[in-house]
Amino acid sequence: MIGFCRLSCYDTDVRPRVVSDKPPPRSSRELVLTALRERGPMSRAELARYARVAPSTISAVVQDLVADGIIVGSDGPRATQRAQPGRPAGWLTLNPAAGAVAGLEVGFDFLRVLLCDLAHNIIGSGRCELPDGHTSAVRLLAARRLTEQALAAAGLTHSALIGAGVSLPGPVHHHPDVVKPSAILPGWPRVTSDDFAAALGVPVSIDNDANLAALGEHIWGAGQGCTECITVKFHYGIGCGLFVNGTLVRGIGGAGEIGHTCVDQRGPLCRCGKRGCLDTYAAIPAMLDALRPQHGALTLPGLMTLLAGRDPGAIRVVSDAAGLVGEHLAAACNLLAPQRVVLVGAMSEAGEIVLAPIRAALHRNIAPNQLPELVLGTLGTRHTALGAVALALGESDWLPGAPAHVGQPGGWLGASTDPFVRPEAPS
């Protein structure tokens, strides 16, 4: 179980984050509820700007929603104790007792789930390992079991769950959402968001892990307040999440696959089926292979230990890989001219050992655009699961109703009368 954590959004930009087919909300009431669901705590002034209506209109809508118990303010019994430091008084949020959303990160050999209430607080989490050679059916079953365990640990029943977002380590085609057949993610033949919805029993949206890492950092981490941003996931594969004009670029699926740009057409065979991809030269497996003659069968923790001990061979291999990532990242920066580049993934833990060569490569290769700010992500290992939460909140059609149920035992929260359980400590 982890300590209480609020995930409030501070930026006031009101443009969309994820392209969606659902119709936009129409009434001022729907706009207020949608904004609070997607963005978390907001002030009346922010809500007025979001809805593009007069402050007096927002005040009337807010007054009715507070009276109905659907939203709570900074003077509420819970909000007073949990207000975010530095945030001005008078912020509003959906009643945390109205429901929960799950964010699932599906890795190659693990599953992670985070639960958030509708005030954007983490209220539960869980993780499990997956067996070698498992199928998509095994993952779907494990996703259901892990989600149910997290709900139970948070004192909630399944009826509290209103939706889920799922991150996958491979290409996803959008509208409709379906996993693209590829050697990158074998064993997932045409799995769709509907398959996950059937397994979890709630509406589900799915996306690539790099996209959702970027979305998590954009909403709650190092990408906050930045409308033009590239988030690079430097991991066992190398992917990018792209924000342009405040919106996550998804394309039809596969946007940001920087790891599968070609370094050498005659290079090593990549898992995608092409030769000489950036992944084959710069991702974690390539670095471990390069160090094998000196250090044998090395693991990622072993590599990080070598870097911490300033092993010259390890530093050289990692620096060369980071510089290569920087060169290809510079090409993306020349196209998009981002304000900021956010680095996440396991190799971000190496700090300046990877930042310095990436920064140098950007400086050499970006022209005539201004150099972007290069920073580390701030969400630790949770960026992707939090991005899945944000995806579910942003794409959900759910809006609260039936205010008589809010916060009552046996209502939307099942038997629990206090949803603010203490989840596990941040990693």
Image (cartoon, rainbow, N blue to C red):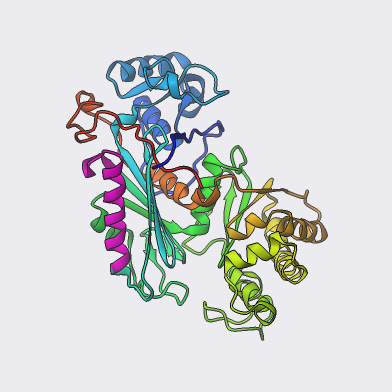
| Viewer-nearest residue: 421 or 69 | 421
Q: Position of residue 383 (x, y in %)?
A: 51, 49
Residue 170 is one of the magenta-drawn residues: no
What x and y, as percent, mark residue 211?
51, 55
Q: Position of residue 221 (x, y in %)?
A: 57, 42
Instruction: State whether residue 80 appears in this view.
Output: yes
Compared with residue 82, is residue 285 higher up or lower down, i.e. above or below?
below
Q: Nearer the viewer, residue 421 or 100?
A: 421
Answer above or below: position of 204 versus 254.
above
Image quarter in which the N terminus is found:
top left
Q: Is residue 248 visible?
A: no
Choose top left, top right, bottom left or bottom right for residue 206. Answer: bottom left
Q: Which residues are magenta?
A: 138-161
Q: What residue lies at 67% left-to-right and 60% top-to-bottom?
A: 332
Query: On the picture, is 282 further left or further right than 14?
Result: right
Q: Residue furthest left?
A: 410
